[in-house]
Amino acid sequence: MDEVVKGLVRDENVLVTATICTNTVEEARKIHDTWPTATAAMGRLIAGSVLLASTLKDKQRIMLQVRGDGPLQEIVAEADFLYRVRAYVRRPHIYMGLKGDKIDVGRAVGKGFLNVIRDLGLREFYQSSVSLQTGEIATDIAYYLNVSEQIPSAISLGVFVEPDNMVKAAGGFMIQTLPQTREEIVSYLERKLADVESASSMIRRGLRASEMLEEVVGLPVDIIQISEVTYSCPCTKDRVFNAIVTLGREEIKSMIEEGKTIDVECYFCKKKYEVTVSELKNLLQII
């Protein structure tokens, strides 16, 4: 079972969160038929969205969008308060080799922006954007948290892809200092994190998310939440109708005049929907 674990360092103002989402990333890989570099980039963003979803309240959700000038072009991952995740990458058939012993995600992403969209259950979404610092995803999310939300954060994200293209390990962890965190603890964590093992390596060793946290911080952690992570897309035909309605009456009339059934495919789950001329006419009557 994929999981996310949230806790507090005992007797300290330090929030820690870790996720193991190997099965979720593997499912996304299968849906989108991604090659290794695209898999690693999408998997890191999935893990990052899960970590940030740990800050959500009831009925809320968060979307991370990476748009760069590299060959991947765009990656999107969305997670809600129940850790239901979905994702896609604009160009899934990208493999650019290794940088050292890791997949070269940064070069595939390139320069661009990280957009963070929060649906807080209100009429309008909250959106923030920062320039990509490295394109390696983890550094960019940490930069967003430090700059846009003023939350000092350290993030590690990792995806290990086997030679046969299957995802062997995927996940990450996030360490956040809260107000009144002692300077001694901040200095200690900075030294500890400088030499910490990568998230994907710890997952490959068989560590659970809670064990990852204790190894990362080297201090007792009081767990406050353990939840399951799943790949889930809420798309329905009604949502397709709603999207068509936003095109406006004139566009719908034009589609009716063409007299053809419209084929619509969901970006996130690849499910296909057919919208007939009769259904378009019904939509036109209600808007």
Image (cartoon, grey):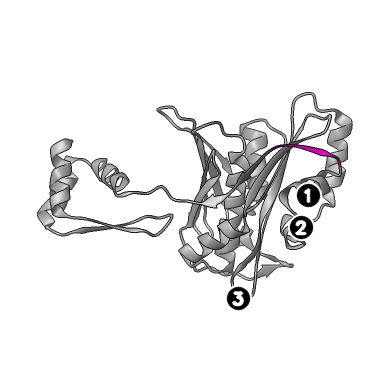
Discs 1/2, front: 1
Which residue shows up at 37% across the image and 55% down it? 266
Q: Nearer the viewer, residue 74 or 85?
A: 85
Q: Which mark is residue 202?
A: 2
Q: Which residues are magenta?
A: 219-224
Q: Nearer the viewer, residue 203 or 173?
A: 203
Task: Give yes or no for residue 57 being in the magenta stretch.
Answer: no
Name the spot of residue 122 as percent of width and height, x first.
44, 27
Magenta part, dominant SS? strand
Is 282 left, or right, of 37 in this rendering?
left
Q: Nearer the viewer, residue 188 or 139?
A: 188
Rounded to the nearest angstrom, the CA distance separating label 3 from label 2 is 21 Å
Estimate how packed mark 1 is, as few (under 14), some (14 to 19) or many (20 or more) residues with alpha carbons within 10 Å: some
Task: Give yes or no for residue 223 being in the magenta stretch.
Answer: yes
Which residue shows up at 45% across the image and 32% down it? 125
Discs 1/3, front: 1
Quarter of the image that includes the C terminus:
top left
Name the spot of residue 197 as percent of width and height, x first.
80, 56
Is 212 left, or right, of 158 in this rendering?
right
Q: Which residue is mark 3?
A: 164
Rounded to the nearest angstrom, the CA distance separating label 1 from label 3 is 28 Å
